[in-house]
Amino acid sequence: MNALPGGLEQSFRLAAGELGMCTASWLFARELGAAGGAAAVSQLRDELGRMFPVLHFVTSRWLEQKEPLPPAPDRVLEACAGADQLVVVGLEAMYLDALLGRLPGLRVSVLTESPFKVDWRRVLANLGSNVTGTELSSFQRLAGRRSVLLTFLYGRQGNVTHITPAWLRVMGPDVRTQFRTIIGWDVLGDRMDVYPRWLFGISTEDFTHLV
Amino acid sequence: MMSNEGRTGTVPLLPLPPGTATRPRMPTTRTRGEVALSSIGAAIQPDRLEKLLAPWLPEPADRAFVVRCLVGEGPHHHRGSNYVLLSLLGLLLERTAITVDPHAPTAQVPMRLPPHLLEHNPEGHYPLLMPLAPLKRLAPEGSAAFLAMVDTLTDGPPQHALANAAMVAMLDVLLARMDGQP
């Protein structure tokens, strides 16, 4: 019997685009779990897990009765000490929200690139008035001696971690030397269970700070 | 099997004219670019450069950024060269007190941003500034030659331009000491 509501993949794509894959995955696991129990979450994993490896990871953890990695922005704040500009590549609302409230005096910009279709005006409005959008063609306007780049990491295994394609567009050898600090913030805490498909593995050594 | 032949030995010299006294061969070492990149990386001690640059870059985050650009980015042979040359200058500086005049004229080392973005980015330069005093010894300040020197030293990828600026800063101290300046 199909315990899942129709159009779930479309809904997940929308949520993943506007909240981030990890945040959306926990939201879906919890809501489906509340409505249909473990059977519904297990079915969600079976149907969409291979396409969305972060969702597979999260639903597996939910089924093991585990909790998400707690958003602990302290180490991000330490890495941002003395900076005046933060550029965020990728979205993970659960983690970004915990950080944004603790960044007085720091200008924050989010790169408006995503593997999903995103209404960036709505996303930026939700993030708060001190957060602006920036594009691939102009984000280097925000580079500088007190500028920080941050992206979210989807698990780590040894010195390999996975990131969204937007990070590959940003992190060229030129940009590496234009930002003082380069932060990778792991939101999974462990390696993914299934092939990461359109996420990409890079070296953790690409980051000056791993959180 | 890999051969080590030629990696260490003597440089063959041009033949001397008949009747000329024999020229002694000087022992030397050469490589053919066969050194593993990991060996270059292992030889670099970023902490040494961070300590060395502290008088010019008092902020730890600034130092870490500049040192990363000097020995952590770009081609490995540049990283290694930067480390060796700056460390050697550092050995000289260990023999003298380092005083940096924060009001002395300096030049910024710009980041290599696209021009239309650099115009709108006042922060688009590195925290290490290049002192201009040593260049005044070579050309009058403001002259075409002087400006050309500043340009050539501060232009280019950061592993070049920042290494230039750091070396000029260290030479500035050493030259001043040799002149008997405090």
Image: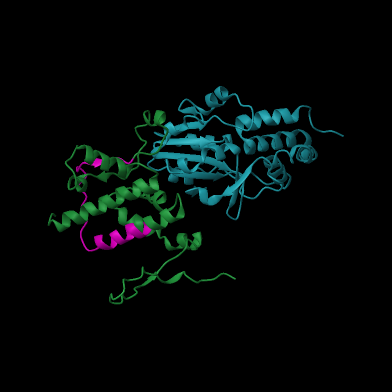
Chain colours: A cyan, B green
Residue drawn at 45 percent across, 43 percent down: A77
- Which quadrant holds residue B174? bottom left
Q: Position of residue A180 (x, y in %)?
A: 41, 43
- Report the quarter where the N terminus of chain A lies: top right
| Image: magenta residue range | B83-109
Residue drawn at 48 percent across, 48 percent down: A209
Q: Where is residue A152 in the image (x, y as percent from the top left)?
A: 56, 41
Viewer can see residue A40: yes
**Does residue B36 lie above or below B136 as drawn?**
below
Residue drawn at 22 percent across, 51 percent down: B172
Residue drawn at 42 percent across, 33 percent down: B114
Q: Where is residue A115 in the image (x, y as percent from the top left)?
A: 63, 33
Residue A66 lies in magenta, yes or no?
no
Q: Residue furthest left?
A: B180
**Does residue A138 lie above or below A153 as drawn?**
above
Q: For this view, does A64 lie left or right of residue B175?
A: right
- Which quadrant holds residue A164? top right
Q: Where is residue B73 in the image (x, y as percent from the top left)?
A: 45, 49
Q: Nearer the viewer, residue A43 or B38?
A: B38
Q: Nearer the viewer, residue A186 or B120?
A: B120
Q: For this view, does A135 lie left or right of residue B172?
A: right
